[in-house]
Image (cartoon, rainbow, N blue to C red):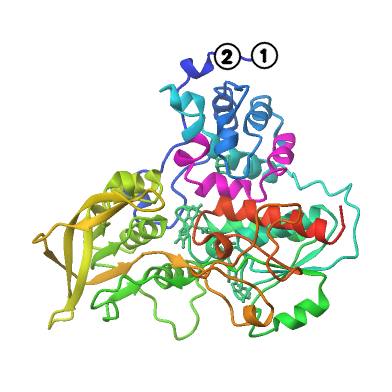
Amino acid sequence: MGDVFQFMKLSRNPGDKVEVAVRKIEFKEIYTPLHAVDAGDQAGRCLSCGNPYCEWECPVHNYIPNWLKLVKEGKLFEAAEMSHKTNSLPEICGRVCPQDRLCEGACTLEQGGFGAVTIGSIEKFITDEAYKAGWRPDMSKVVWSSKKVAVIGAGPAGLACADVLVRNGVRPVVFDRYEEIGGLLTFGIPEFKLEKAVVKRRREIMEGMGVEFRLNTEIGRDIQIEELLSQYDAVFMGMGAYKYMKGGFEGESLPGVLEALPFLINNVRQCLDTLPAGEVPVSMEGKRVVVLGGGDTAMDCNRTSIRQGAKKVICAYRRDEANMPGSKREVNNAREEGVEFLWNRQPMGIEQAADGSLRLKLAETRLGAPDAKGRRNAEIVPGSEEVIECDHVIIAFGFQAEAADWFERQGIATAANGRTLASSHGEIKYQTSNPKIFAGGDQVRGADLVVRAVFEGRQAAEGMLSYLHVW
Ligand code: FAD
Ligand code: SF4
């Protein structure tokens, strides 16, 4: 038995951050990896609570105290096997989950004022280090089935679905319209949160397990859904949520006003040197930038603009800091890197000056009564308008799911807001109104988190295995 008072002797250490002056000019992860000794010591701070709240708050219900104990004992391969029992992308969730709102926020030590166990950093450490030491998923006991499943979308939901299927003997074929796997992990989240080499390594692991990827292939364009349905016993859709949400104010289409995701993807492609011929590299070098929004996408636009050399970056959000949807950790990182925040500001319109620069009109807001989801509405304070002069406005108001044109033909029902209807209850989970087609992730939930997409992809795979009578 270890020292149960380690949490009092050793303070929380999630790993060092690269110093601001360096990280502001490079597209690399900002947290340095934990050393093995530190990971073991930090894992040793866990109290092994009888009823671990961290597990309940973790959307995939990771066996957190169990793998922390294995790390403390130096049993890295066992920890890797255990962490993959509940999570298909543990090293990725360890990097991008908003732990302060999930596992670490619920840690008993955090509640007691001692600082949470560094669950995210250790989860990342386990797979990173185990992989380096030669660990690969143990597939030795898999009994292969003749069932065939197609997965549409190689984002977190599709990857998680494929992971559970292949571990249960069904070799999936994963289709994606992009040239690389990952969905928003590759073509969305910037390298300073998640280096693309990590996603590439996951591809290697999955191909080694027997997952086949067919990339640069869009279902509905290159292959019709009817063809998939005739060739496969079941189909999973993890196609994400990509309908861009507009603000509905004047000037949104002016030159110089950019949509968040194309801006971020353009930057990723510049970093990877894969910008298609004819696509102009976008740069904020020397520019005054205003980012509108308060979620993870907005933070990524802020920090990408900083790294591209923007002269000034302001982030304006219509609620206050306490009510913003993004991760607190990422807001702090953005602030450290020089982003200025204007809370309680609502955009009213954008005009273009004769010299091409933009004049963004903002009004102050105050928080009114909570809406149906319990979030307090932002109400405009009369007479509070101000104008900010800038060169670019980046709009990051989020995304909605939407139905593809084949949904109606295939009898796939959607909600009024475009989300695909797929039930999380019953034995056959995440089945759509077409029994042969399953769905999960942002397409079903609306734009959300990587870890929730992973959970739904895994659950849908279990539903498919029941449907196909594989277990
Ligand atoms: P996606 O990741 O969107 O993947 C869907 C895939 O389906 C894509 O690869 C797409 O090309 C493919 N596809 C779609 N239609 C077709 C078709 N017809 N044929 C073939 N392929 C198709 N979450 C966090 O937890 N932490 C963060 O820090 C975070 N930061 C974010 C930053 C940004 C900029 C954005 C936009 C989102 C962020 N998120 C974050 C949210 C997270 O990325 C998503 O919730 C998650 O990726 C959803 O996974 P998914 O598999 O459902 O969809
Ligand atoms: Fe925490 Fe996310 Fe890992 Fe769950 S998956 S333990 S919420 S970092």
Residue at image mark 2: 4
Q: Is residue 92 left or right of residue 242?
A: right
Query: Relative to 194, does residue 130 appear above or below in the rendering?
Result: above
State the image quarter where residue 160 is shown.
Answer: bottom right
Residue 423's spot in the image, x, y percent? 65, 58
Q: Does the residue at mark 1 contact the one at mark 2 (Cβ under 8 Å)? A: yes
Residue 204's spot in the image, x, y percent? 71, 59
Query: Relative to 7, does residue 101 appear above or below in the rendering?
Result: below
Residue drawn 44% across the image and 54% down it: 192
Using the image as rendered, state which of residue 70 and residue 228 is in the foreground. 228
Residue drawn 54% across the image and 39% down it: 120
State the image quarter where residue 145 is shown.
Answer: bottom right
Residue drawn 33% across the image and 74% down it: 258
Residue 408's spot in the image, x, y percent? 63, 80
Using the image as rendered, state which of residue 230 and residue 29 is in the foreground. 230
Ligand 2's quadrant is top right
Q: Is residue 350 left or right of residue 75?
A: left
Residue at image mark 1: 1
Q: Amino acid at mark 2?
A: Val
Question: Is the N terminus in the top left, top right, bottom left or bottom right quadrant?
Answer: top right
**Magenta part, dominant SS:** helix
Q: Is residue 390 rendered magenta in the image?
A: no
Q: Which mark is residue 267?
A: none
Q: Residues within 10 Å of mark 1 (few under 14, many from 20)?
A: few
Q: Which residues are magenta?
A: 77-104
Query: Relative to 52, does residue 446 appear above or below in the rendering?
Result: below
Which type of secondary structure does the marked residue at label 1 adopt? loop
Q: Is residue 318 left or right of residue 445?
A: left
Q: CA distance from mark 1 to mark 2?
A: 8 Å
Disc 2 C-beta below 8 A from ligand 2: no
Q: Amino acid at mark 1?
A: Met
Residue drawn 39% across the image and 43% down it: 329
